[in-house]
Amino acid sequence: MNVFANSCASTDDVGPTDAPCADARATPCAAQTASLPYDLPIFLVGMMGAGKTTIGRGLARTLGREFVDLDHELESRCGVRVPVIFEIEGETGFRRREANALQECTQRRAIVLATGGGAILSEENRRLLRERGVVVYLRASVDELYRRTCRDRNRPLLATADPRGTLRQLLTLREPLYQEAAHLVVDTGCTPVANLVKSLIPKLQAYEAQQ
């Protein structure tokens, strides 16, 4: 069941990591102000620049949960940034490492996990996300995605002559997959992150009753 909300995030998703899917670069929570009636993990999916890391940290803090960034996990494991993994192993090698990390991370309870923008390309990844937790698709327009990523040099897929066009092509390809994986959909428009998180909490709290 998809639920739609409106909002606006600032820049997000940073780069990536091979150490077990543990606490290497996870962000512990601080001031909890809300709770959920379940300990299912919350998985954030969406394009690069959609706000997964920024919103994920705020959501984890509000829920008193640990925040984990899948790209950061990959970086910790490999000891290098995502662009270097792409350069050495290509996208195929990167996706294989990403799938292994996702397999481990999705087994952890009571976390907020920000996935990489392309994690949903794998059918198996989409299945694991839907079956093991609550998937929130953070949706944004091409113009908004470009504004948030145009100065970021850590996004190998955007190292092209026309990054805006590349974003448009990627979103066209991935949109149906995000929709397929998602239990909830949130539009990251122009609302402050704190307000977005506040509006998302009751939807997450009601999720169990919707099933």
Image: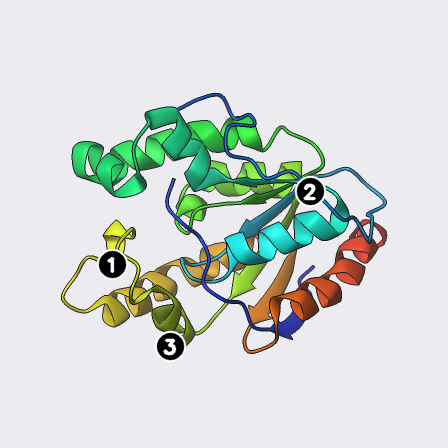
Q: Nearer the viewer, mark 2 or mark 3?
A: 2
Whether residue 136 can be seen here:
no
Q: Residue at x 55, y 78 (%)?
A: 190
x and y percent of residue 132 in the render?
65, 36
Q: Mark 1 or mark 2: name the one nearer the start of the chain.
A: 2
Q: Position of residue 127 (x, y in %)?
A: 55, 39
- Residue picked out by circle 2: 29
Spatial CA distance of label 1 from label 2 is 32 Å
Amino acid residing under circle 3: Asp
User: Please, what secondary structure does the residue beneath circle 2 have?
Assistant: loop
Residue 154 visible in the current orientation = yes
Q: Which mark is residue 158?
A: 1
Q: Which mark is residue 137?
A: none
Q: Is residue 15 left or right of residue 33?
A: left
Q: Determine the residue located farthest toward the top in the rendered image.
A: 20
Image point 38% across, 39% down: which residue?
Answer: 16
Q: Which residue is mark 3?
A: 143
- Quarter where residue 38 is shown: top right
